[in-house]
């Protein structure tokens, strides 16, 4: 299976994950600073800044886009409860 | 509500400001979480300028008759140019739809964040409004309202409104309390100090950081009077209440001891001493990392409230529970259910415990810690029955792991996902 390296810049930890892993599945297990509220793209608690590798993340769904817009999120922001990792990326909590 | 209270008139607050709120002396429980032994008030205000009238906040729907009667005694609906809602919770937005029906020419001003809630609260998407933020102003001719964006006090939408020429701060729930006394002013009502402190500790305490942010906006203002949405109007020594909010919201441990020293607290409870021995070994391992303070508490030996005070200023919290009847034990849940009174978001956390055959407790506690937005860097540690020498070494290692993470030096920088616990 294809692998990807997801790096949590705030704690300096990199995790090798199978491509297609959701960020939430990893970040909670390593104690990264990204935290979750609704876990279903409603609240924006998990807003995450993508430092590099935006092109290696799944496309945002319409509902993720709507929540990002409500929170006036920049083009470098994603919701960690929604986003799948397809290739290497470096992220950190946006809030 | 007795007829006397419903018909009592409006109350002059200044030349240009009238209280047009409602008394609710029979209220006993508020928002499920608050006791209100002598009821509450919903304070709404009317401001008169040379070029129109503003209504600041409304009341709970059940007390709308009082509000409209008092409003009608000081103004005509046709004069209302501005309606401000500082907070959309139903105790203040209850009479809004009817007010807008009676004063259709008025413009509604709400905070930016309130936009996201207005529709879901009123179930009406046709309501027109103007979103405002800090330093936006609305003129009433010779009187000016200025808005202060003060989010999360105690909802995302909360704001304050300052009447510049009078030095009056319409503060919403901030500086409020549930205390019902028709004398209304802080220098003539009964002793409401308990209610003020109680309201802060149950409503504002989880948002101390936001309180400090709001105080940065409020403290520089010339303040002659604070007009909150509940309880007494603060005209005598209004600064005293502002200072009290600052005092209550400032972290204290770091004032007493070196700011850079972090704190870890290990709570445990143990029937035969197994979880206790784990706790001690975890403490020893964490102490090897060094550079932070550690304390160990047996939940059986203390009360929840002081423990919650400790947690509020701690950086890492570990919780140990045996599994009894497929669950963590009640003192552990009592502690964890009280974390909602404070802000634990982002604190480092972990769970551990001894078990006999199924060991559900640790995973359940860990899920709760994550649900509270705490950061759980290492999978919880479960040990079957009596910890062996090897298992105690695992406990020390777990302590080293959490300690290193707390000190910003996670032991593993490169991890394969398969090494992470299945949970
Ligand atoms: C003191 C207080 C705190 C609240 N905190 C939250 C919160 O953290 N997250 C949330 O989604 N809603 C929060 N709410 C909003 C309530 O969940 C919401 O008003 C809900 O509709 C109340 O439902 P009920 O009428 O069944 O009590 C809070 C409400 C109050 C009064
Ligand atoms: S956790 Fe609510 S949007 Fe992701
Ligand atoms: Fe409120
Ligand atoms: Fe309120």
Image (cartoon, coloured by chain):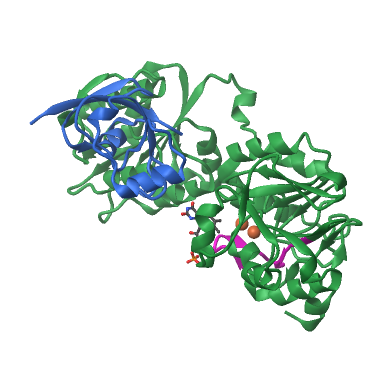
Chain colours: A blue, B green
The answer to whether residue A39 is visible is no
Residue drawn at the location 24% of the way across and 49% of the way down: B360
Q: Residue furthest bottom?
A: B3
B199 left or right of A2?
Answer: right
Left or right, residue B241 beside residue A77: right
On the rendering, which quadrant does ligand 3 occupy? bottom right
Q: Nearer the viewer, residue B32 or B255?
A: B32
Horizontal and vertical percent position of residue A29:
28, 34
Vertical placement of residue B107 versus B285, above or below: below
Q: What stretch is highlighted in magenta?
A: B29-45
Camera-side residue of B394 and B233? B233
Q: In which quarter of the image is residue B87?
A: bottom right
What residue is rendered at 30% in x and 33% in y?
A27
Depth check, front residue: B18 or B204: B18
Q: Quadrant of the C terminus of chain B?
A: top left
Residue found 53% across the figure and 48% down from its top: B341
> In this image, A48 relative to B42: left or right?
left
Residue B106 placement, left or right of B405: right
Question: Which residue is more in the foreground, B14 or B104?
Answer: B104
């Amino acid at each position: 299976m294809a692998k990807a390296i997801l790096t949590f810049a705030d704690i300096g930890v990199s995790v090798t994950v199978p491509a297609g892993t959701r960020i939430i599945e990893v970040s909670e297990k390593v104690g990264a600073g990204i935290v979750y509220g609704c876990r279903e793209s409603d609240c924006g608690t998990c807003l995450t800044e993508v430092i590099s590798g935006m092109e290696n993340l799944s496309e945002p769904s319409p509902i993720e886009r709507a929540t990002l817009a409500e929170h006036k999120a920049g083009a470098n922001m994603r919701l960690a409860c929604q986003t799948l990792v397809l290739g290497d990326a470096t992220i950190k909590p946006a809030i | 509500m007795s007829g006397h209270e419903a018909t009592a008139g409006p109350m002059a607050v200044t030349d240009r400001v009238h209280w047009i709120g409602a008394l609710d002396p029979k209220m006993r429980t508020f928002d499920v979480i608050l006791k209100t032994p002598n009821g509450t008030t919903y304070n709404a205000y009317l401001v008169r300028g040379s070029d129109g009238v503003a209504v600041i906040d409304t009341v709970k729907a059940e007390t709308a008759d009082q509000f409209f009667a008092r409003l009608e005694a000081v103004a005509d609906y046709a004069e209302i140019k501005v309606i401000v809602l500082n907070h959309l919770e139903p105790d203040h937005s209850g009479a809004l739809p009817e007010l807008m029906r009676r004063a259709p020419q008025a413009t509604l001003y709400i905070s930016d964040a309130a936009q996201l809630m207005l529709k879901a609260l009123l179930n009406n998407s046709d309501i027109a409004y103007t979103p405002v933020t800090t330093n936006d102003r609305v003129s009433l001719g010779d009187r000016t309202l200025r808005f202060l964006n003060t989010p999360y006090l105690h909802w995302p939408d909360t704001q304050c409104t300052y009447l510049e020429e009078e030095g009056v701060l319409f503060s919403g729930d901030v500086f409020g309390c549930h205390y019902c006394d028709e004398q209304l002013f802080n220098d003539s009502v009964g002793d409401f100090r308990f209610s003020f402190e109680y309201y802060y500790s149950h409503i504002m305490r989880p948002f101390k950081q936001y309180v400090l942010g709001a105080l940065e906006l409020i403290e520089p203002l010339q303040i002659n009077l604070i007009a909150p949405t509940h309880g007494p109007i603060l005209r005598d020594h209004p600064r005293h209440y502002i200072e009290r909010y600052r005092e209550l919201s400032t972290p204290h441990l770091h004032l007493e001891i070196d700011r850079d020293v972090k704190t870890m607290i290990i709570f445990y409870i143990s029937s035969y001493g197994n979880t206790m021995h784990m706790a001690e070994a975890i403490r020893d391992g964490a102490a090897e990392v060094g550079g932070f303070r550690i304390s160990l508490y047996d939940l059986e030996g203390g009360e929840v409230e002081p423990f919650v005070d400790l947690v509020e200023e701690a950086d890492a919290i570990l919780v140990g529970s045996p599994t009894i009847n497929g669950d963590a034990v009640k003192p552990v849940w009592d502690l964890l259910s009280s974390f909602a009174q404070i802000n634990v978001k982002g604190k480092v956390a972990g769970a551990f415990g001894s078990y006999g055959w199924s060991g559900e407790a640790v995973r359940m506690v860990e899920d709760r810690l994550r649900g509270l937005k705490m950061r759980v860097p290492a999978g919880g540690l479960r040990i079957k029955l009596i910890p062996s020498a090897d298992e105690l070494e695992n406990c020390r290692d777990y302590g080293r792991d959490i300690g290193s993470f707390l000190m910003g030096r996670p032991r593993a920088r490169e991890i394969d996902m398969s090494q992470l616990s299945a949970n």
